[in-house]
Image (tube, grey):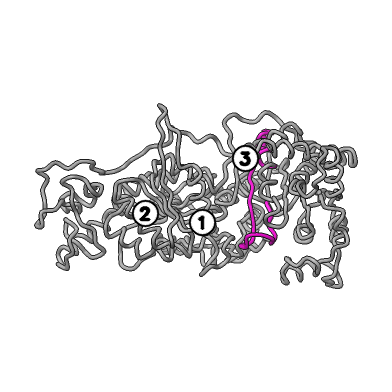
Amino acid sequence: MLPNKGPFANSLIWMIGGAQGSGVDSAANIFSRACCQGGFKVFGNREYYSNIKGEHSYFTVRVSDDQTRSHLDGINVLVTFDAETVFRHASNVLNGGIIIYDSNLSNITLNEVPTIDAPAVKRIAEMFENHDSNITLDQILNLARDNGAVLYDIPYYELLRKFSTEINEPALSKLTRMINVMAVSASLAVLEFDRAVLAKSIKLVFRAKPKIGDMNVLASNFAYDYVRSKFGLSGKFRLTCKPPSEQTILVQGNQSSAMGKLVAGCKFQTYYPITPASDDSEFLESNQIVDQTNDDKGSIVVVQTEDEIAAIAMAIGGALTGVRTATATSGPGFSLMTEALGWSGMNEVPLVVSLYQRTGPATGLPTRTEQGDLVFAINAGHGEFPRIVFASGDIEESFYDTIKVFNFAEKYQMPVIHMLDKAIANSVMTCEYFDQSRITIDRGKLVQSVPKQTESGAAGNYLRFKLADGPISNRVPLGTENGIFWNTGDEHTEEGHITEDPAIRVDMMDKRLSKLDIALQEIPNEDKAIAYGHMDDSLGLTIVSWGSTKGAILDAMDQLRYDGKKIHFVQVRLMSPFPTERLENMLNNTRILVDIEMNYSSQLGSLIERYLHRHIDYKIVKYNGRPISASEIYNALARIINGNASRRMVLKHGT
């Protein structure tokens, strides 16, 4: 946990847990939206097992008056309505923190919770001297109390019975779904949160079902009144609402890139269901008809294919017709796409692949996060062909970057792999309203019509791959009159016909691969790498990283700056072609180079050592499937600054 001072003094870490399918996500959504409407900055992270229903899931939300971009390790308010959440997370509640639990579960033992796996049972039992796995919920709560936690026992089912009587609804089973809302309300009552703002949030979440929304508001108020009357104002923490910023919105990570696709003019997306990429396509499926200006309507076609091979092949076909096209997948699916990716490179097809990384190899941890696919994405496919690999660092970036990668794909006529991950996809964050003035659309050398007198090749066809035009030829959609050309997976002539001529082979390879040199020259420096903070001359320490570690690094840097330590951070965004010259300039005065990544082998670090011939002094890695926290980074950097750190540090926090 970060020291409770400086920019984090008013931070509140709230967590809710329960069995998957019990309403954990809905409850966290209500809490996050309420806090956003209450004028707070929010960052939330969702963790869940790969089964559909029953196993444990939890949602952590960090709330602050100040900008917040990551989660922390400790918990200030733990909201539970099942035994497993208490057993798993009570020990992480900080001194003065709050635990809200179901008083009817007090005598349940650890062994009676079948969904707690054996390693977790062992770790929990080891908190007690006799290592007894038959400990009760009361015992774990007493231990938390001894560590400074404040307990609030809520008899949920008794409250439901009283509530059912009050609203004259005898069918209690219909009301059990509201326990999650009552739990959220109980926590906000303890925090003295404005109940009117809470009610507004509940109605917003249930806006498609207003009657259910109204019923949940009644249940929320009932629980709120119960807690206030029973416990009074005994808690340490408060959330005092203020008017929200008119420029702030709450954005879910699994929607930001999809929204970018709509704004970019993507007209066709394919996918085969895979976690965590499916949410991207499902959002597009729910918003296929887009309201535009002048009462016009735009649309996007989203197709679920029979497998990932079909998904990328169909997407390539769509791109050849001249429309902006994407496919979305995760590691195992991307593995299947690599042959067709090479076909796209050979035929200079502008294709966007949204690659949502998760833990590998094979199926790995299907619903957990990692940054293990970087080197794979850069080298995927046999032979040599051009591709751009571009990485986003957070939810806001993923929106704008999605528009950029479509521009890159069409301008340089090659596949672009947009690197995202589960940590971004399954988080929620307050952002500034997306700024339309920052958006540009560049379709490159797209030709919509071809005159009859156009020069043709030996077979009388259009010179789609014309060498005299330079590395980037004019591109015509399939079916364009006078624009007939051929596509093949083999090497080809300017018309696209198969050839094995050695001279043409050299010319075509030079044509395709030299486009990377052009891209490296033309892509703006801020899209290659961005610097944050200022280097302390006496320290000379620079962090290099990429992707979703960004927020945790920035939050840790804020705390270190409060401690009087200035850290320089370089976020690499263009991963291929690698921006060697840009990074050399940015790392010029660095004496201590620290690489932070969520993979085993420090993949970005290996690229820096390869291209810059620069040794990485300290490698901070995490690969247990849980997202990296600001707390972990702060503590690791503090050890480096104090001179007591090992050259390679493995971060392991996470439940």
Which sits in the foreground, 64 or 269?
Answer: 269
Crowd band around label 3 with a 10 angstrom C-alpha radius: few (<14), some (14–19), many (20+) = some
Q: Residue at x 72, y 44 (%)?
A: 12
The label on residue 315 is: 2
Q: Secondary structure at mark 1?
A: loop
Q: Secondary structure at mark 2?
A: helix
Q: Quadrant of the C terminus?
A: bottom right
| Residues in magenta, as a range | 31-59
- Label 1 to label 2: alpha-carbon separation: 46 Å
Which sits in the foreground, 391 or 649?
Answer: 391
Q: Amino acid at mark 3?
A: Gln
Residue that mark 3 sits on: 67
The label on residue 591 is: 1
Looking at the image, tell me whether mark 3 or mark 2 is earlier in sequence order.
3
Percent x, y of residue 584:
41, 53
Seen as rendered, the residue at the extreme top is: 294
User: Looking at the image, is 18 positioned above or below residue 566?
Assistant: below
